[in-house]
Each structure stands twice: as C-alpha cells, then as structure tokens.
Image: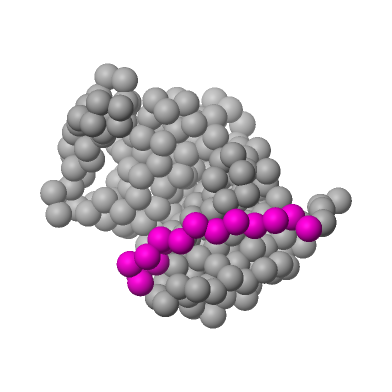
Amino acid sequence: MNHIIPVWDIAARTIKHIFTGHEQDIYSLDFAGNGRYIASGSGDKTVRLWDILDGKLVYTLSIEDGVTTVAMSPDGHYVAAGSLDKSVRVWDTTTGYLVERLESPDGHKDSVYSVAFAPNGRDLVSGSLDKTIKLWELNVPRGAFPGTGVKGGKCIRTFEGHKDFVLSVCLTPDGHWVMSGSKDRGVQFWDPITGNAQMMLQGHKNSVISVAPSPTNNLFATGSGDMRARIWRYVLLFNSQP
C-alpha cells in the first residue's frame, strides 16, 4: 500500500490534492459536513485531520493502538475514532484536544471497527468485534481543556443480536434507526429508544463490511466481501417513535 490519500475534483476528473504522512495502511476516511476537512485513520496509531482548501495537515492525533475507523460530527466540531484497544476516542477539531474516551466497564470488550455520529451531533454509535453495537451520550463542553476528556460520556444502550463481528454502523438521517452490518452477512435495523432489533435483511454471501444511508431519501447501500454492493429501499409503515 502507498499510504496516501488522493482527493479528486469530480467535475474536472483530476486529482486536487495528495495527502501524505501515514506510515501504515489507511483504514477509514470521513468528510466534515461542510466539506472542508477530511479525517483519516490508520494502522500507524494516528488520526489525521486535513484541510481540503489549502491541502495541508491540520492535526496529527496519536493513540496507543491501531485506528480502525473515524467519523466526524455533522458540524465538524468533533472527530471520533475506534481502535484495536476497545476504546472510542473523541477530539475537538478546533483545538486538537482529546475530550472523550468511551470504554469499560460499559464499553466494548473487543476491538471497535465502526463509529458514527447521530444527526444531533451529541450521540454516537459504535460497532465491535464483541458482536454488539453501543449508543453513547457524549458529555463534552465546548472549549474543553486538555486532559479533561476522560470517560465523560456514558453508554445509554447496548444492541445485541448479531451472531458475529459488527463491522459497520450508522444512523438514518432522521435518527429514527440504527443500522449495522456484520460478518454474519446480515444487515439489522434497530430502534435506538428501546434497543430492539426491528428488521433483519439478508442477501449478501459474505461479510457486510459497509452500510451507508442516503441523506435525502429512504435508500441505503451495503458493501460486502462477496464483491457486491447493493442498494436497498425501506418504507416506514408506522411511526414507532414516541
């Protein structure tokens, strides 16, 4: 692997920037909602924040183990990362300070392979090799000082039902559903209020490694180790939310 991040101008079909600096494989990328920043996570134990406008590195955020997944909050104010060390960390992108570390006793018991912010920017979901998904409520005051962000958030829901590793998690844009993909080849919809599984979809012939909802309608895409991507449509038959 070449450990680089090419950024393409889609309209011009040309490479606008090439970000370099990671020393091992890059496992995850995410754009900020405003499109200005990209977060990257790597096996070199770093999260890096890049500025698309000027093509420069903003921060290098180092941890104790490999980074498997990154996600930026909808307003771009926070970046979260899951790691091989079972933890989820959250940094303030304006300061580079670590402001949350989400872990045991309520945390995951194995490596975290996927994280995603809720549309409200205050909650976060994580999926792990321990076969569970967890919903976290963040407790981060803006402008927090370095060293203040240790185990401040709390796990408010644990979703159990997958029979193998949870490899991808996300929330629908309206926040009504948590979605997950697993090595058990299934895609599950979960009620974030009750923690109950609402629907299980099967169709892939290998692990579901990516799940992503459309921002504008009731479509979502899944990617799998069977070398196929599928696009699905879901319909809300009744509103189960209070």
Q: Nearer the viewer, residue 43 or 241?
A: 241
Quarter of the image for the N terminus: give it.
bottom left
Asked whether the viewer can see residue 171, the reply is yes
Q: Which x, y percent locates residue 240?
A: 82, 57
- Residues rendered magenta in the picture: 223-237
Quarter of the image for residue 4 reads top left
Residue 10, horizontal then vertical, whole percent:
30, 31
- Residue placed furthest toward the right: 242
Between 213 and 94, the one nearer to me in the picture: 213
Tell me: 135 left or right of 10. Answer: right
- In this rendering, the answer to whether 69 lies above or below 144 is below
Task: Place residue 217 in its image quadrant.
Answer: top right
The percent coordinates of residue 5 (x first, y second) are 23, 40
Q: Residue at x 18, y 37 (%)?
A: 20
Q: Nearer the viewer, residue 230 or 24?
A: 230
Q: Is residue 139 visible to us here?
A: no
